[in-house]
Image (cartoon, grey):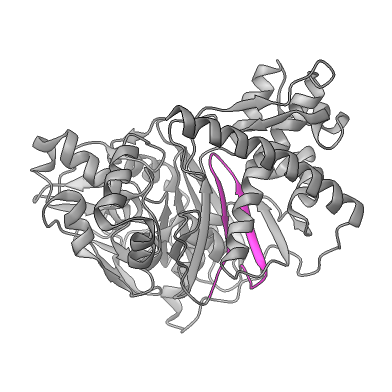
Amino acid sequence: MPTVAGVDSSTQACKVVVCDADSGVVLRTGRAPHPDGTEVDPRHWWSALRRAADGVVDGVAAISVAAQQHGLVAMDDSGEVVRPALLWNDTRSAGAAGQLIDELGGPRAWAEAVGLVPVASFTVTKLRWLATHESDVAARVARVLLPHDWLTWRLAGEGEPTTDRGDASGTGYWSAAEGRYRTDLLELAFGTAVGVPRVAAPAESVGVVADFSIGAAGAAVAVGTGDNMSAALGLGVQPGDVVVSLGTSGTVFAVANAPSTDATGLVAGFADATGRFLPLVCTLNAGRVLTSTATMLGTDLAGLDRLAMDAPPGAGGLVLLPYLDGERTPDLPDATGSLVGMTRAAMTPANLARASVEGMLCGLADGVDALVAQGIPLRRVLLIGGAAQSAAVRVVAPMVFGVPIVVPTPGEYVAQGAARQAAWALSGEPAPPAWTPPVDPEVDDVAAADVERGREVRAQYRHWRDFVHKVREVQH
């Protein structure tokens, strides 16, 4: 019985799963933490992968790495990393994003060129920041990789660097619609030509594990992909499914057969891990909105749940705009959160707890609306991530999204998607193996009364969201 391994190298930790290659059943798991921060020495990722894989990946036939998107790993001509990697959640390049948008001719020009409009998260803006603020370091850069590219390169013995179309599509210098690098945009950002990894096919093996300290030595190394692309593969996302992931950040994505071009910048027109496309909306603030509110209220997440369930829909008029760490969608990197609609009657712990849940979900519902505006069908929402286990989130979500909510059994879907990709590379078949999806295809309708209450909650949120945005525009 062949087995395969999938790696999820996320912002917070490295997670490894070993699955049966035919059925997808998870057999073993491992985990090791990553250091906190918005810039990290990539060697920490490698160390964490080795610890997480220790005694777990022995005997696997293939392995694949999925990792956090957008991170900038800059290397010199000898393969040494020249500075700590700048991660997706590092917002210092917000000014660079604005410069690049103007230099190409505006948001529409970028959306038509590469399917996205630069914000601080994307790799292309980090390159401009590096060239501007650390010119001595930039002068040493010979090649630029993403986190999953670098880990795959290390696994396969540091030969030719490779990437996949999914992760490449999040850089800002690779076009999902055209399937090619836009080297002109790379040079626009960095000021000079720089090496980039070869884009391998979705089911391609790019080498074998060369490090004998990892129990998978000699196993085939699949091309790997970005974390959101891998999650879609692990979940078996179908047309009509929109995934809302409530992790450190919040993401909303779906699989599509055609590329997206959104000049508003709300929807990033990524590619997926199978040859199709993955339109995606990302917010910087999701689960930590709840943890921060719980801390403010002197309770834990279970206590926050109980309080939120005691409050009425709409939280008595209290609205939390959850831009606690700035925001990516909408593009407000320097914003702070706002608590509005405060009255003596509304100012209760229960209403504040409820407002935190509603505010987080309303921000993500705006993302769902943006996907629908791009022609994405919406039949149900798959709710994943740590905050999806919240009882209050599960009660409020059907109201806010207005469609049935499915909460898959908790699992490491990014790592499982990577394992499925490894099994695909091993099989040589034209499509990924048909592992049993972790979600029930049947859904229940949402009560009309709940949908109406959800409309009222969202209208209240939109009123204050637009008001606060106008105030910010005046201030700036």
**Looking at the image, how many numbered discs can be counted on the residues?**
0
Residue 119 versus residue 19: which sits nearer the camera?
119
- Residue 391: x and y, percent? 79, 39
Residue 370 versus residue 149: which sits nearer the camera?
370
Identified at 36% across, 41% down, the residue is 87
- Residue 113: x and y, percent? 32, 66
Identified at 74% across, 44% down, the residue is 459
- Residue 208: x and y, percent? 29, 65
- Could you tell me if residue 323 is visible in this image? no
- Could you tell me if residue 245 is visible in this image? yes
Residue 116 versus residue 251: which sits nearer the camera?
116
Identified at 18% across, 34% down, the residue is 133
Asked if 19 appears above or below 36 in the picture, the reply is below
- Residue 43: x and y, percent? 28, 40
Quadrant assignment for the C terminus: top left
The region drawn magenta spans 237-256
Quadrant assignment for the N terminus: bottom right
Identified at 46% across, 84% down, the residue is 430
Looking at this view, name the residue that lies furthest to the bottom: 430
